[in-house]
């Protein structure tokens, strides 16, 4: 999609059209009333500075390269000073224009008693590389867009958010967060680079580059193999408790994977397809298997015996527990399963403030041998 079509989509959003299926509170830019701004063919008539600024924004959002603005005979302000100020504000204080508008030039002419401005807008070369510009009212919808990008292998996202507190670093962290919550969407952790453009208030535009670390063909082939893994085809989940489901995922990995010291084997693909992964890869695989079974699970980054190590925290019937699959593979079944904070602290260290308190009372015997 060209940048002009993308800009037109944003105009549609500003006028109330829904760009995404997800519901968000609508945030609209100022739109002059018919008394302030009117259109006659391709000529925009304005009565004040705010209407002048909106006329320039309308041209830019529609991707126009030329247009005419007519100053009403009763225009409130100085046309010469206002024209210069409005062009500067549109070019620098609107995030979308800061991203794609290269320059706004104009010529002021007086025809009898009415002033006219011939406006010329040039755009930066983003029409092919930017892809669709996604428009959100708030940053709460960003994770959905990133997850969709992973599913389709999209390498570049441009997201315009009406009100956002995200920095460029926050947006890059969002890419990492989505991967860690859905580690089977892509074969390995993507790297994100983010350029941010600011507008008036909290308006932000983010240009997000996503590097998957492999060719599209290789990624498609690996993703297909990863998604083809069927760990629970023979599992009868009827009447199974959350704890029993968590153990089923744990048991699958202990039966089908080995521990690797290779730092490149740090993803769910290494564990579920190749059957050999380090602690991070096993923890990601456990997140994915638990997700398939409906168990709340997250990865933990910390230390074990003062060495960098990854494991998981699961939520079972409202209580949290530590689970370390790599410990079970190394030391035997049952090791590292359903530890509370006190039990784990003898060997493990983690940022306690960043993870929920684990104080559950279940143990392996309660689950495996419970009739």
Image: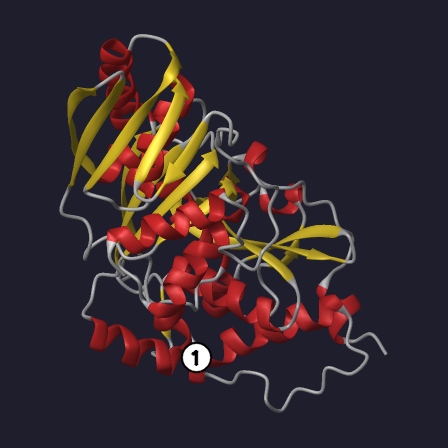
| Residue 168 in sight from this viewpoint | no
User: Can the viewer see residue 77?
Assistant: yes
Residue under circle 1? 227
Q: Residue at coordinates 64% horizontally, 41% vertically from top-left?
A: 356
Residue 298 horizontal side relative to residue 246, left or right: left
On the picture, is 243 further left or further right than 332?
Answer: right
The image quarter containing residue 214 is: bottom left
Residue at image coords 27%, 73%? 219
**Residue 158 sits above or below residue 333 on the image:** above
The mark total stands at 1
Residue 202: x %, y % from top left: 45, 26
The answer to which quarter of the image holds residue 27 is top right
Image coloring type: secondary structure
Q: Nearer the viewer, residue 249 or 14?
A: 14
Identity of the residue drawn at 74% across and 67% down: 242
* Residue 253 vs residue 192, the one in the foreground: 192
- The residue positioned 65% from the left and 43% from the top of the image is 341
Name the element at disc 1: helix
Q: Nearer the viewer, residue 164 or 341?
A: 164
Q: Is residue 322 left or right of residue 97?
A: right
Q: Quadrant of the N terminus?
A: bottom left
Q: Position of residue 192 (x, y in %)?
A: 29, 48
Could you tell me residue 9's position as x and y percent? Answer: 40, 52
Name the residue at the front extreme: 112
Neighbor class of circle 1 (other Cα within 10 Å; few <14, some 14-19, many 20+) is some
Report the quarter where the C terminus lies: bottom right
Q: Position of residue 6 (x, y in %)?
A: 33, 53
In the image, farthest residue toward the right: 371
């Amino acid at each position: 999609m060209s940048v002009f079509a993308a800009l037109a989509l944003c105009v549609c959003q500003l006028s109330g059209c829904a760009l995404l299926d997800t519901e968000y509170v609508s945030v609209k830019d100022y739109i002059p009333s018919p008394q302030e701004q009117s259109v006659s063919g391709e000529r925009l008539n304005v009565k004040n500075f705010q209407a002048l600024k909106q006329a320039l924004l309308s041209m830019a959002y529609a991707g126009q390269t030329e247009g005419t603005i007519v100053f009403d005979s009763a225009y409130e302000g100085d046309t010469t000073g206002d024209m210069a100020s409005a062009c500067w504000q549109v070019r620098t204080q609107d995030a979308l224009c800061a991203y794609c508008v290269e320059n706004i030039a104009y010529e002021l002419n007086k025809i009898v008693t009415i002033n006219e401005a011939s406006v010329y807008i040039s755009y930066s070369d983003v029409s092919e590389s930017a892809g669709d510009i996604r428009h959100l009212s708030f940053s709460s919808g960003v994770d959905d867009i990133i997850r969709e990008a992973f599913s389709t292998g999209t390498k570049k996202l441009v997201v315009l958010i009406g009100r956002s507190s995200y920095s460029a670093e926050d947006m890059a962290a969002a890419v990492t967060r989505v991967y860690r919550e859905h580690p089977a969407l892509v074969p390995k952790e993507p790297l994100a680079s983010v350029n941010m453009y600011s507008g008036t208030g909290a308006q932000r535009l983010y240009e997000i580059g996503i590097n998957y670390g492999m060719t599209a063909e290789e990624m498609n082939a690996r993703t297909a193999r990863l998604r083809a893994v069927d760990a629970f085809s023979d599992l009868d989940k009827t009447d199974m408790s959350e704890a029993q489901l968590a153990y089923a995922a744990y048991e699958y990995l202990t039966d089908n994977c080995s521990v690797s010291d290779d730092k490149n084997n740090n993803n769910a693909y290494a564990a579920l397809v190749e059957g050999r992964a380090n602690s991070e890869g096993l923890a990601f695989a456990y997140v994915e298997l638990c997700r398939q079974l409906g168990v709340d699970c997250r990865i933990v980054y910390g230390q074990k015996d003062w060495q960098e190590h990854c494991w998981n925290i699961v939520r079972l019937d409202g209580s949290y527990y530590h689970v370390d699959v790599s410990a079970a593979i190394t030391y035997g079944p049952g090791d590292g399963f359903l530890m509370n904070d006190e039990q784990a602290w003898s060997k493990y260290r983690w940022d306690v403030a960043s993870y929920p308190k684990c104080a559950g009372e279940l143990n392996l015997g309660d689950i495996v041998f419970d009739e």
